[in-house]
Image (cartoon, helix red, strand yellow):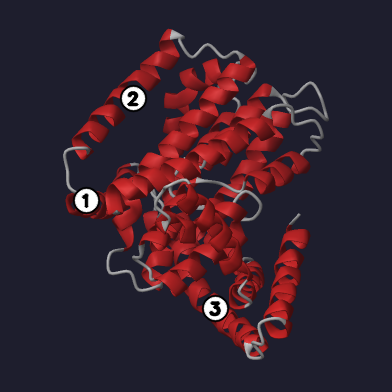
Amino acid sequence: MLNGLWLGFFLVAAVSALAQWLVGGNAGIFAAMVESIFAMAKLSVEVMVLLFGTLTLWLGFLKIAEKAGIVEWLAKVLGPLFARLMPEVPPGHPALGLITMNFAANGLGLDNAATPIGLKAMRALQELNPSSTTASNAQILFLVLNASSLTLLPVTIFMYRAQQGAPDPTMVFLPILLATSVSTLVGLLSVAVMQRLRLWDPVVLAYFIPGALLLGGFMAFLGTLSAAALASLSSILGNLTLFGVIMLFLVIGALKRVKVYEAFVEGAKEGFDVAKNLLPYLVAMLVAVGVLRASGALELALDGIRHAVNWMGLDTRFVEGLPTALVKPFSGSAARAMLIETMQTQGVDSFPALVAATVQGSTETTFYVLAVYFGAVGIQRVRHAVGCALLAELSGVIAAIFVCYWFFA
């Protein structure tokens, strides 16, 4: 899948460049494409330096949380809910702890770090699966919730914005939180319908009703604020939550007599191992996206979408942020490259860049997750997993666009 996508970027760019040269007489198009190749390779290294620090930092703190028993406590707190949503998983099964850790990593926006944990969780669920080739209900729910990208603290998005010079990297905190809540809710409801889960069970309602009331009240409060106040509140809450999570991990770790420094270093080493393997993928995708943009092919595609949106009488400012949404279901590295490229060409705080950042933080690489997670355990029949995951993905994109108009337009 990634091979075809990556090769397709170059083939489309080559056809577009030839057309511009032979038909449009633009002989400088090839020089622009070659210049873009080297510029994007350099940008990859610059982005990677900060990514090393971010993954190392947060996996270090996540290790403290794990040793302090926070993850185990979360697994116990969520146990009654999992018992209703995944009735085939026995209480106290190791899969529940791994699922909780995976959700914790995803919640912190550490998508690259969440994948190894998620693979362990999928293997643990496969041990309970009566079929070696057909996905179980628990595996489908776990995968769809992964594909819905529940991100409570999108630190990697903050990192990309900071690297591109954003004066306030956390400005997209609330938009991402709202959009990812929509995608996760849609993903859960779609699976519940397909699996006939009893969401009206008193225990399930005891978890969801307080959260729904809190979110509804919070959105009602947000509706009373101006766009400037919304952006300011998003910044304050983003920074406060970010630092608050760090202090929570450290204080609980210290109270539990965890050697927090040693635990941090242990987790940081894992983060370094995860990060060092990302550079080749980042270079490959950024270069491909840069060539596509320099050839004019990307702009031509966006023009077509822009004309269609304009014909419907809608505002077209969000269109420039759509490349991230279009490739996100197939490749996280391609979507990351599109986001960075959009911030580079449009401006880090431009409306398209804010839309792209919100989309990146509230959607997931659906087809990649399906291929990797199910492929790791030999699942061939995925049943309703694809439809539910894509529905969650689409709802996240639409919600991201609407929320950005609410906050930033």
Q: Distance between the Cα atoms at labels 2 and 1?
A: 24 Å
Q: Residue at x 58, y 40 (%)?
A: 147
Can residue 370 be seen? yes
Q: Which mark is residue 227?
A: 1
Which sits in the foreground, 209 or 404?
A: 404
Q: Distance between the Cα atoms at labels 3 and 2?
A: 42 Å
- Give neighbour class at mark 3: few <14, some 14-19, many 20+ (Cα, 10 Å): some
Q: Which residue is mark 2?
A: 212
The disc labelled 1 sits on which kind of residue? Ala
288 left or right, relative to 249? right
9 left or right, relative to 169? right
Provide residue 197's location: percent of width, then percent of height: 56, 14
- Give neighbour class at mark 2: few <14, some 14-19, many 20+ (Cα, 10 Å): few
Q: Distance between the Cα atoms at labels 1 and 3?
A: 35 Å
Provide residue 328's location: percent of width, then percent of height: 59, 52
The disc labelled 2 sits on which kind of residue? Ala
Q: Residue at x 47, y 18 (%)?
A: 80
Local SS, label 1: helix
Q: Which residue is mark 3?
A: 45
